[in-house]
Amino acid sequence: MQNNETLHLLTHHRSIRHFKNQPVPQDTIQALLNAAQRTSSSMFMQQFSVISVTDPELKKQLAEITTYPFTKSSGHLFIMIADQHRNEFIGQEAKVSTQLLHDGDRSLAAFDDAALAGQSIVTAAESMGLGAVILGSILNDAQ
């Protein structure tokens, strides 16, 4: 077990809050999103969506909301959203009942799915030698 790369990566995690102001290559972004999409998910519903932010003006606004100036210098910003709307839409399109999506357990599962997918992005980024940090402060202004 001492030479297990995954355990080494997980046990040596550290949040990075200083970034190079340079774009992240598209193939790297796609690899990170693929990792998120393959995250364990409650009932395989994947009740999350990802917003990708690269626009400097939006990152500047988000830096103000989060109160972290380093947000504007990140190469790429992922915002994880607990999202049942997507599954509601899929259910309606398939003409099946979406009633189950409206109970508290499904809402909690959506939050779990989004958090787990975010952690998968962080772990995948670190495995590629990239720095990452999770910011709960995005909720300072959810709109």
Image: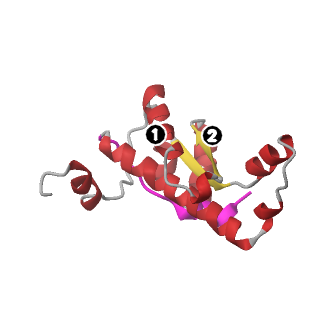
Judge left or right: residue 83 versus residue 39: right
Q: Residue furthest front?
A: 96
**Label at residue 51:** none
- Identified by mark 1, the residue type is Leu
Residue 141, quarter of the rendered image? bottom right
Residue 130 seen anywhere in this rendered image of the structure: yes
- Of 129 and 61, nearer the camera is 129
- Of 98 and 72, nearer the camera is 98
The first of marks 1 and 2 along the sequence is: 1
Which residues make up the magenta segment?
129-143
Q: SS class of the residue under badge 2?
A: helix
- Identified by mark 2, the residue type is Glu
At 81% from the left and 46% from the top, the residue drawn is 89
Q: Main secondary structure of the magenta part?
A: loop
Judge left or right: residue 16 versus residue 118: left
Q: Is residue 29 above or below residue 16?
A: above
Q: How many marks?
A: 2
Judge left or right: residue 123 versus residue 88: left
At 55% from the left and 46% from the top, the residue drawn is 78
* Mark 1 lies on residue: 32
Measuring from the top left, give residue 79's x and y in whole percent: 59, 50
* Mark 2 lies on residue: 57
Measuring from the top left, give residue 101's x and y in whole percent: 77, 61
CA separation in Å, label 1 and label 2:
23 Å
